[in-house]
Amino acid sequence: MNRLRLGVNIDHVATIRNARGGRHPDPVRAAHMAAAAGADGITAHLREDRRHISDRDMERLANEITLPLNFEMAATEEMVSIALRHRPHAACIVPEKREERTTEGGLDVAGQFASLKPLVGRLMDAGIRVSMFIEADPKQLDASKALGAPVIELHTGAYCDAEGEERDREFSRIKAAAAHAEAIGLECHAGHGLSYDTVKPVAAIPSIMELNIGHFLVGEAIFIGLDASIRHMRRLMDEARGS
């Protein structure tokens, strides 16, 4: 079975830094630590309001880290310009509302197809691997495929927040969507809200190639350290894949 990749999102190291100002804790240092602990990539979301990751962080990440950089971005001209300047390995297009605490739900690719098409084309022409952050909905997967994006990332927040039978239903939707992605030739990633308690079922889905996890790992690091937090998540993912 293919090894499941772990992308570590460092946004909330920057959230803690920005709560007081100054330079500490440094999200770029966290990226280097994540690499040493077994991460396969680094994810950072430069939001319109710059509430956590800053433009300077993105510049340093692009110049200093050796792991693939996944730039989460809203579908705006400003963010496209920044992506074209830094040329990250990948750009994950996410919905963004200024008033939200975090990304809530997936992007409506089907409904925004006309505006997304030229944006995706510009990023792809620059050699940036584009992914669409979407709900586990076949309509959204088909629209992402039609856009020409090679990758989709399934939003796992509803699954992580649910309990009992509702969690089972949400998991079934994720599993079916991952199978549909594989059937239509899309690489499937997943993320949002995953923890030690919720990661294994998702990690065991063979058609999912990468998980992006951040907030939980940074929160757990308060108690056990970032290195230990990431290494334990890596072990759980490997166990789920039988490796």
Image (cartoon, rainbow, N blue to C red):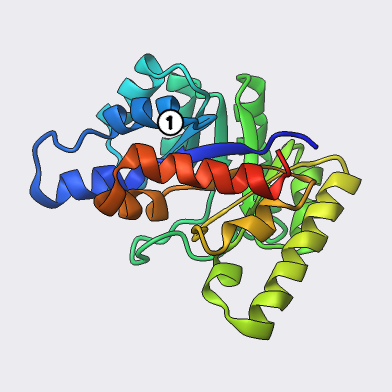
On screen, residue 86 versus residue 18, left or right, reads right
Q: What secondary structure is marked by label 1?
A: helix
Q: Quadrant of residue 211?
A: top right
Q: Considering only vertical position in the picture, is 134 above or below 90?
A: below
Image point 9% across, 49% down: which residue? Answer: 20
Residue found 27% across the figure and 37% down from its top: 54
User: Crowding near pointer 1: few (<14 within 10 Å), some, many (20+)?
Assistant: some
Q: Position of residue 23 (x, y in %)?
A: 13, 33
In screen coordinates, is 35 left or right of 202? left
Could you tell me residue 196's position as x and y percent?
50, 58
Left or right: residue 154 versus residue 43 is right
Residue placed furthest toward the right: 183
Q: Is residue 71 above or below residue 11?
A: above
Residue receiving disc 1:
37
Q: Nearer the viewer, residue 37 or 17?
A: 37
**In the rendered image, which quarter contains the C terminus?**
top right
Residue 5 visible to an observer of this rendering:
yes
Asked whether 64 or 86 is in front, the reply is 64
The tally of labels here is 1
User: Residue at coordinates 81% horizontally, 49% vertically from top-left?
Assistant: 181
Location of the N terminus (image quadrant): top right
- Tag 1: residue type? Ala
Please report the residue visible at 43 percent of the width from the left and 26 percent of the height from the top: 35
Quadrant in the picture for residue 189 = top right
User: In the image, residue 114 lies at what x, y percent?
Assistant: 69, 49
Res. 75 in view: no
In the rendering, at what x and y percent does residue 26 appear? 22, 33
